[in-house]
Image (tube, coloured by chain):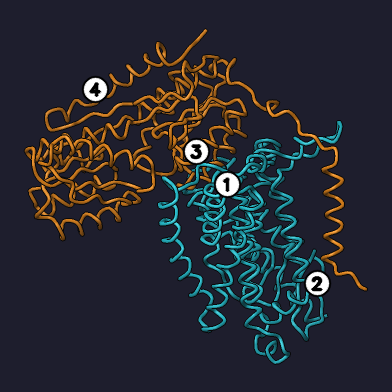
Amino acid sequence: MKRSPFLRLGLGAAALGLLATAGCTKKADNEDTAAAGGKTADQVRVALVPGGAHPYFQPWKTAAGEAKSELKLGDATFNETSGWDQTKQNDVIKSLAAQGYNAFGIFGVAPENINSTFEDLKRQGFAVGSLASCPAGDVNKADFCLSTDTGEAAYKATKAAIEAIGGKGNLVHLTGNKVDSNTQRRIAGVDKAVGETGGQVKVIQVVTDIDTDLQTAQKAVADLLAAKGTQINGIVTTAYNPAVAAAEGVKQAKLPIKVIAIDDDKTILDGIKDGSVSGTVLQNPTGQALVGSYALLKLSEGCTMAQPGVVVDSGSFIVTKANVDNYETDRKAKTDELRSAFDGQYLTCK
Amino acid sequence: MEKTAAPPGRPRRLPLWANPRLGLVVLLVLLVAFFSILRPAFLDTRLTLTPLQSDISVYLVVGLAQLSVLSLGHMNLAVGRMAATSAFAMGLTHDKLGAGLIVSLTVGLLVGALLGALAGLIISRTGVNSFVVTLAMDFALVGLITILYASATDGVAFPTMPAGMEALRFDTFADYCLGDICGPRIPLVVPIALVAALLVGLLFRWSRLGREILMTGSNARAAELSGIPTRTRVVQAHALSGLIAALAGFLLAANNGAFSAGIGDSFLLPSFLAPVLGGTLLVGGAVSVLGTVLGATLTQVIYKGLNLLQFQLDQLQLYIGLVLLAALSLDRARHVLAERRGAAP
């Protein structure tokens, strides 16, 4: 009987497998793990890696350069080539590590499994900070997470919106990716503020998944205003593109809707100045990058986290017509305060 | 491991230098040398070469999934979504039923094969082009995956993984020793991909089923008249494609560290690149598994190299496009030249 090649192959593979597994032992796991530390500032090479290209991260680019000269780092770079794909981001990070970068500030594309990336880097002895977004769930495997408390920022924004519409009426909430844990926190923050009005204010619609690009957001806002424009008293936006789109849309439609935006795009700042936008919630991307780099430097020099994985709020600020010209001072003050908090509270240095 | 079925009536062989596989090997060697000179870190075993092997393994299997239907002259545009749906099935089996690695993987592979078979069945029964059928399937599955993940998990990923996935993610054979002799720094996922390639190669080269699929792809009518059940072969080839896509989903989940909804998002283009670069015809009737291995390696080497050179986003995409275009044109030019030489002996 002629044996089929499949059978022969199967037998061969089985024999080989048996030979390989017999008496095979696994090396101790901890052999590869090394601790960050013991480096001098000029040996520390910081890489700031956002999830992909997005206007929010642009201040990181300048901040990387600033951190490099101010902290006298070996190098500090900014790489936005991850393309909102966790696999690509992992690849970008590994490539940076291969080039000698040894401290990472990362905005993880997928909050659900970014912890495994952090773990991977920690195993190789790198200092890792989760910047601008914390991993989903209660565990953060990075050394620290320095991010806007998204729930708190959404709460502040909604409070401002409620005040702007005079304490009663209908709100609409525009935000980003529904299955992102940060979005869930934002929705909860809005609900909390609305709940405190005791039924005076209602959220009549939550529009999600419109932060991918400006066109998507513009279309969603146009549709929303066409369908429900007259019923809406206020719009709360908790993501960048919807904020810009809402500011423009409401201005063009000339509806008496109060808009609370997020971040400081020029359209939004202009809107605040001419009164078409009631206010905006600013985050602190520069502070995240600067203080994040500082903490990464300290960890690389041998400091440890007093509480590994600690979550630190990088701050959020309400800007209205009253303080539109001097909000940078507040933001700078918050950044300085964060840095001293890392020195005095979060880091333990010998 | 060269697997081609030459169309009947063309016994003339191309000269060795015109073999597209050889061209790819030369190009690969040149690129590796080029990147290593510019960035010595390219040869760093732990940070570059080991992850590179994991990446190649995933995209090799993705390429094989497409190759299975390219053999018919068909396409599977739902290759990424089939991987995602299967990965969901694997995650669900583990997370909700507490099944181990093998059982979860088997369930996932089965789901992939069934999805593929469904696509094949629609194509063979209705006669609608595979492009349209699998495109529609892709759209349907995008929605389904979001709904499934939203109902079964808190977000877009399962929080747990079967025991053993961690080892597939982190370990290399260097971690396993027989006495004092430890293996090379090759990730554990590599042999899985190689066995898949070997089996697909054997299928198309030696088995009756594989030869009949190729004949169906080469000329469906002639195959039908020779007594080949072409409709069944179409269903089988698509089922195989779904099965292999599921395996690719599993390997990517192992590499990424979670069964998540994003699996397969980036599969579509590479799934065509690897086999086509390797000399598999889009019109069907001839496949090359070895070429697919080389094609997948080439694309990943280019990507890794450009990444190491730290190109900015726009430049990176531009250069990947340009390098691939150059590779394809060179290949085509060499082929045309060889044909001319062959025609005038």
* Quarter placement of the N terminus of chain B: bottom right
Instruction: State the CA–CA distance, disc 3 to disc 4.
Output: 32 Å
Above or below residue A53? Residue A49 is above
The answer to which image quadrant residue B195 occupies is bottom right
Above or below residue A152? Residue B339 is below
User: Which kind of residue does numbered mark 1 sit on?
Assistant: Gly
The answer to which image quadrant residue B142 occupies is bottom left
Question: How dense is the environment of label 2, judged by Cα within 10 Å: few (below 14), some, or many (20 and up)?
Answer: some
Residue position for label 3? A114
Label 2 marks a residue whose chain is: B
Instruction: State the CA–CA distance, disc 2 to disc 3.
Output: 44 Å
Q: Do the residues labelled 2 and 1 touch (CB within 8 Å)?
A: no
Labels 3, 1: front one: 1
Q: Which residue lies furthest to the bottom in this view?
A: B225
User: Which secondary structure, mark 2?
Assistant: helix
Give the orange chain's letter. A
Residue position for label 1? B98
* Mark closer to the chain start, 3 or 4: 3
Q: Can residue B301 be seen in this view?
A: no
Residue position for label 2? B206
Q: Do labels 3 and 1 share a chain?
A: no
Residue position for label 4? A330
Q: What residue is at 65 percent from the left and 85 percent from the top?
A: B220
Q: Can residue A339 be seen in this view?
A: yes
Q: Is B80 situated left or right of B186 in this image?
A: left
Question: How dense is the environment of label 1, judged by Cα within 10 Å: few (below 14), some, or many (20 and up)?
Answer: some
Q: Are marks 2 and 3 in contact (CB under 8 Å)?
A: no
* Residue B78 horizontal/vertical position (percent): 52, 65
Q: Are marks 4 and 2 on the same chain?
A: no
User: Which kind of residue does numbered mark 4 sit on?
Assistant: Asp
* Residue B66 horizontal/vertical position (percent): 61, 66
Give the cyan chain's letter. B
